Amino acid sequence: MKTDAYEKVKTARSNFRPTSVDYIHHIFDVFLELHGDRKFADDGAVVAGIAMLADKPVTVVAIEKGHSIKERMARSFGAPQPEGYRKALRLMKQAEKFKRPVICFIDTSGAYCGIGAEERGQGAAIAENLMEMMTLKTPVISIFVGEGGSGGALALAVADRVWMLENAVYSVISPEGCASILWKDSGRADEAAEVLKLTAQDSLNNGFIEKVISEENIDEEPFYKMIKEDLINELKVLGSKPLDELLEERYRKFRKVGQK
């Protein structure tokens, strides 16, 4: 019998689940996509640009899987390459310059693990995002809408507020990968999912996130409206803080993770 945790993993991976682009189209009044990392190429797995939220400009960065098989192949099934993370960082630094808040949507099983990605500095690109986001001088909110896999997800999750949908997952490794390493048997993924504590409620209990978003009426207008209102309200709170206080709270938030 599959565990509740593994059922959530399967739900997070569902082809019928809204992807990041769906959230962008329903939540923001205007969205202008920008492309490229100015170093190598444009990565289809990362959709990023400038949007309007309640008549205020924001920068949006999203990891997108796509719906159809054609879309998913073009977007590497939501596995960003180094240039995707560099594009994200380029736009976040631009947001800092123009004092725009940053909103990230995360849905990835992990960063792309091909030879080319390694040759172009995958690990360094992720590490640079972690470092720069920690001191980014503008409010940042990250939302896990599906899978949150390893450093590929963490690279967009160093934020003032991290939220998860109730059936999203956040883990250092997939249950299948964990089971293969620990027990040499990927068929025990359901057990691994339970041990990994990867559900939204687990993340909330362990202090990794601040909020679990209900999936009632998911992919319907009331659902998107609720998230939009929550974002507007939270950005007002974060925007009212002095910059030094905002950055100190962000730093303290991550320093205390794992402490009892």
Image (cartoon, rainbow, N blue to C red):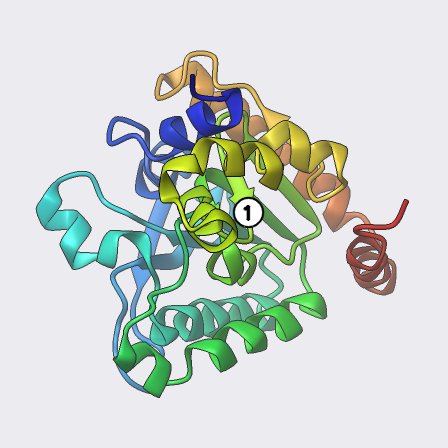
Q: Tell me the residue at 28%/79% (across/down).
A: 115
Residue 180 position within the rendered picture, expressed as x and y whole percent measured from the top left: 42, 51
Question: Where in the figure is residue 225, as x and y percent of width and height?
Answer: 47, 22
Residue pictured at 32% horizontal, 31% vertical: 18
Q: Which residue is mark 1?
A: 171
Q: Residue furthest left?
A: 70
Secondary structure, mark 1, is strand
The residue lying toward the viewer, choosing from 78 and 101, is 78
Which residue is painted at 27% across and 67% down in the image?
43
Residue 171 pos. (x, y %): 55, 47
**In this view, 229 is above or below 260:** above
What amino acid is found at the position of numbered circle 1 in the picture? Ser
Q: Residue furthest front?
A: 184
Horizontal and vertical percent position of residue 144: 51, 41
Left or right, 121 with reference to 226: left
Q: Is residue 227 visible?
A: yes
Residue at 53%, 63% in the rendered image? 155
